Image: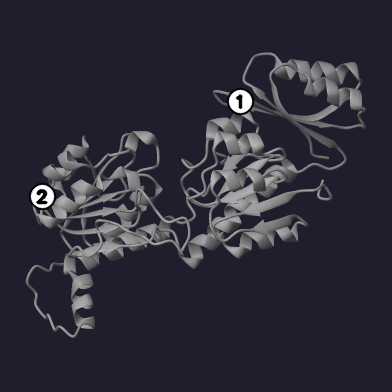
Amino acid sequence: MKNRNINVLLLENIHPDAARIYEDEGISVRTVDGSLGEEELCKQIKDVSILGIRSKTQVTKRVLECAEQLLAIGAYCIGTNQIDVDACSKHGIIVFNAPFSNTRSVVELALGEIIMLIRGVFDRSAKLHQGIWDKSASGTFEIRGKKLGIIGYGNIGAQLSVVAEAVGMKVYYYDLVEKLALGNARKCDSMEDLLAKADIVTVHVDGRLENRGLIGADQFRLMKHGSVFLNLSRGFVVDMDALVENIKSAKIRGAAVDVFPDEPKHNDERFRSKLQQLPNVIITPHIGGSTEEAQQNIAEFVTGKIIDFVYNGGTTLSVNFPNLQLPGIRDAHRLIHLHHNVPGILAKVNNILAEHSINIVGQYLKTNEHIGYVITDISREYGSAVITEIRNIPGTIRFRILY
């Protein structure tokens, strides 16, 4: 298997450990510093077996139709809304992401920014660089005892909850899904309830389209006068015009924003935002998960999952395939059959093997709403007729021979 021609394309400055791990497996790797537009990606992807991206590259249906050899996409980040995941499933392309690897980095940035905003450190530092000595306690506070409202209580929100409580904050959270409260955090029955309670509001929701415009003029109206606001989730979650208006009116006394509706595709492109030059506003270039530790963890995690899939068939923690953790095999051949989730596929696979007197030494089946995934280990050599018959089973999406 490892002698087969597998090509990897890594975009957007993915940590070099990813390329090193692939190369150690004898896999050919190409890297591109920035993201690629749809037209260029269509040209580059024709012979690619594994595509690695971060948040800016858009993997559209058209791109996937041009991908003649693509087996897997690695999203070396948390979100996958930049990928047409449904189209990937229809083409038999697995998608992996890194839902946990940069959690701590985002949490530390959020906590640091909360302290900076409550104390007005950012503006005082800027003044001092200009030679202005502004020593005053007026309008600055400790975070101890303040009420932190967390919208989205997933991996990041929950860990921020624990860290914030450890430094003396009172934590409230709201999530659409029922989540177990950690420590002494208190669940709010509605986002409106949370907004009215919190001194600091921080958003940590995912990239689903339903979250577009989640925080707008109506939500800012419910917040306390002089509250602090953070968004380290997705740029389209917040109405920027409403945020700017509330900062200018001092309803929001400080804000930290790490994500924007329109972001540069690479570091050489100029960035512009209405948030620039506003008082007590920290804007950062989408670096919530951009620490050496996080990027190295992501590189190791996603690359490891893809290699396990390519060489062993494992799909644990994939975004779109049924999740199967598989043992290694010896003295056998492994066949992978991906199909639409319709009745009778497993029986057809087994009937074909039985008709050719091929013994099954191990078999694993898992399905989700749309896809069935069958791994079959067989003990003897097989002819091309067996492969042809299995490939031609109605409902087949993709068939692979691993060993």
Instruction: Say if 347 sits above or below 132 in the image.
Output: above
Identified by mark 1, the residue type is Ile
Is residue 112 visible from the viewing direction of this image?
A: yes
Left or right, residue 304 beside residue 192: right
Q: Quadrant of the N terminus?
A: top right
Q: Nearer the viewer, residue 81 or 242?
A: 242
What colour scheme does the image use?
Answer: one colour
What numbered label is drawn on residue 224?
Answer: 2
Q: Is residue 320 visible?
A: no
The residue labelled by disc 1 is 371
State which quadrant residue 269 falls in: bottom left
Q: Quadrant of residue 315?
A: top right
Query: Residue 191: x percent and y percent?
Result: 21, 38
Q: Depth check: 19 or 382 in front? A: 19
Q: Is residue 267 left or right of residue 181?
A: right
Indicate the amino acid at tag 2.
Answer: Lys
Give 39 or 186, whichever is nearer the viewer.
39
Give the image location of residue 323, x and y in percent: 60, 35
Tag 2: Cα neighbours inside 10 Å, few (<14), some, or many (≥20)? some
Look at the numbered disc 2 and give the secondary structure of its residue: loop
The residue tagged with tag 1: helix, strand or loop? strand
Q: On the rendered structure, is 262 left or right of 90?
A: left
For label 1, the crowd category at 10 Å Cα-Cα, with few meaning under 14, some 14 to 19 and many 20 or more, is many
Q: Residue furthest top?
A: 343
